[in-house]
Amino acid sequence: MLSKNKIKFIHSLNRKKTRENEKLFLVEGNKLVLEAISSKLPLKLLIATPDFYARNELDSNLAEEVIECSAEELKKASMLQTPQQAMAVVHMPNNALHIDQLTNQLSIALDFIQDPGNLGTIIRMADWFGIRNILCSTDTVDCYNPKVIQASMGAVLRVNVHYLDLEEWLEKANHAQLPVYGTFLEGEDIYRSTLSTKGVLVMGNEGNGISPAIAGKIKHKIHIPAFASGGDGSESLNVATATAICCSEFKRRTY
């Protein structure tokens, strides 16, 4: 039985302030819930239909509280237009970060990314390329926003997303002699650039690009060239698409 108070609590996790205060976030959908169960993150609450429990042979020890309910009850709690058979409330990870964790790998830094779909797609793409850390400016959209979680397709459960003073951390990267790359219109053609197997790749805001303060910390400016002839192509790329192209080129060099 799913009580009204429990439904109210679940709905409250749609608000960033509640998520931050409770250190909890909501995962919805059969696939994402199964990924949450198999992740290292502890579950506070698991809610599913009898069929979901039976089909996946789940037991009552998977979360602090397990509730079995009907599809109709689940629909009342869901924030999806087309609810499935399960949802879970998950404890946020404690993603403490030290500069040493970044020195031997490629990481992504995001400067004021606003669109939840873009952030979710970037997290999913990072997971695909084996990138374990994403550094976000404090004004970047919350990675536990339900729209981000859905767009990440569960990758947010595996990729470490850090919210921090991005300018300060890029300065730390420079002091550690870790290459810091960023995308600029005046940058060097990425396909002709010397790219390191390690470093931080900075991607900027959807409308304004990389901010001046962050740009001052970037030592290696790169650019994705357009291949449309006669200047008839699009003016720019979506930030998630641009991030994927850059990461693919970085990884291709070490393949």
Image: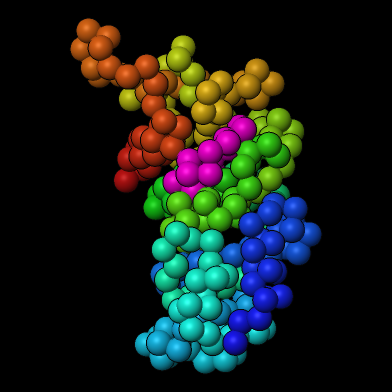
Q: Is residue 181 magenta?
A: no
Image coordinates of residue 174 in percent, x first then y, are 66, 30
Give the quarter of the figure containing the N terminus. bottom right
Q: Quadrant of residue 2?
A: bottom right
- Name the residue furthest top: 230
What's the residue at 32%, 46% (across, down)? 255
Number of numbered discs overlaid on the protein picture: 0
Q: Residue at x 45, y 52 (%)?
A: 151
Check the image and report above or below for 138 versus 45. above
Which x, y percent locates residue 12? 69, 62
Q: Can residue 185 be seen by looking at this rendering?
A: yes
Residue 118 covered by magenta stretch: yes
Q: Which region of the structure is painted magenta?
A: 107-121
Front residue (pair 200, 243): 243
- Residue 14 position within the rendered picture, expressed as x and y whole percent measured from the top left: 64, 57
Vertical side of 6 occupied by 248: above or below = above
Q: Nearer the viewer, residue 14 or 131?
A: 14
- 221 vs 105, nearest the viewer: 221
